[in-house]
């Protein structure tokens, strides 16, 4: 039985040199991280799955409030809204 991490992987039929067929599993691709409000791609976050595995936690995300969740424009708007509603 395949591991849980590859159970839902896309299966591709590949022909062998001897005329037989075998199934290969497609590797997962890491998706571009986007802002949750506007959907703009976030900068400063690595896309490579192999590279992300060896990076430390501080290098996988942006180290600020809502880092890796909101873009700088949406973060600025959210802070301004909080200041206005708090006063």
Image (spheres, helix red, strand yellow):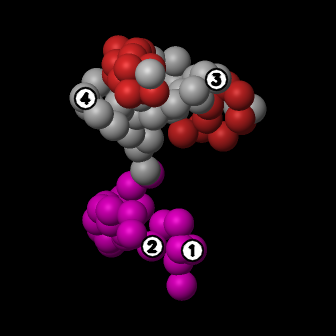
Question: Which quarter of the rendered picture does the C terminus lie within?
Answer: top left
Circles 3 and 4, Cβ within 8 Å, touching? The answer is: no
Label 2 or label 3, whichever comes before in sequence order: 2
Residues under labels 1 and 3: Cα distance? 33 Å
Question: Which quarter of the rendered picture does the N terminus lie within?
Answer: bottom right
Q: Which label belongs to residue 3?
A: 1
The residue nearer to you, when weighing 49 against 39, is: 39
Residues under labels 1 and 4: Cα distance? 36 Å
The residue nearer to you, when weighing 71 against 30, is: 71
15 up-or-down from 70: above or below: below
Q: Which residue is denoted by mark 4 in the rendering?
A: 38
Q: Which residues are magenta?
A: 1-27
**Is residue 24 found inside the magenta-colored segment of the image?**
yes
Residues under labels 1 and 2: Cα distance? 6 Å
Q: Which residue is denoted by mark 3 in the rendering?
A: 63
Circles 1 and 2, Cβ within 8 Å, touching? The answer is: yes
Residues under labels 2 and 4: Cα distance? 33 Å
Q: Residue at x 33, y 37 (%)?
A: 36
30 up-or-down from 38: above or below: below
Q: Which residue is denoted by mark 2 in the rendering?
A: 7
The residue nearer to you, when weighing 26 against 80, is: 80
Locate residue 17, reporting x and y percent. 36, 59
- Dominant SS of magenta comes to loop
Under tag 4, what secondary structure? loop
Q: Residue at x 33, y 62 (%)?
A: 10
The residue nearer to you, when weighing 73 against 31, is: 73
Q: Callout 3 environment at 10 Å: few (<14), some (14 to 19), or many (20+)?
A: few
Locate residue 39, reporting x and y percent. 26, 31
**Is residue 39 found inside the magenta-colored segment of the image?**
no
């Amino acid at each position: 039985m395949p591991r849980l991490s590859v159970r839902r992987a896309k299966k591709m039929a590949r022909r062998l040199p001897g005329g037989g067929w075998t199934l290969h599993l497609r590797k997962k691709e890491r998706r571009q991280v986007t802002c949750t409000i506007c959907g703009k791609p976030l900068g400063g976050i690595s896309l490579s799955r192999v590279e992300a595995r060896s990076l430390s936690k501080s290098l996988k995300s942006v180290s600020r409030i809502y880092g890796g969740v909101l873009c700088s424009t949406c973060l600025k708007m959210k802070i301004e809204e909080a200041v206005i509603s708090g006063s």
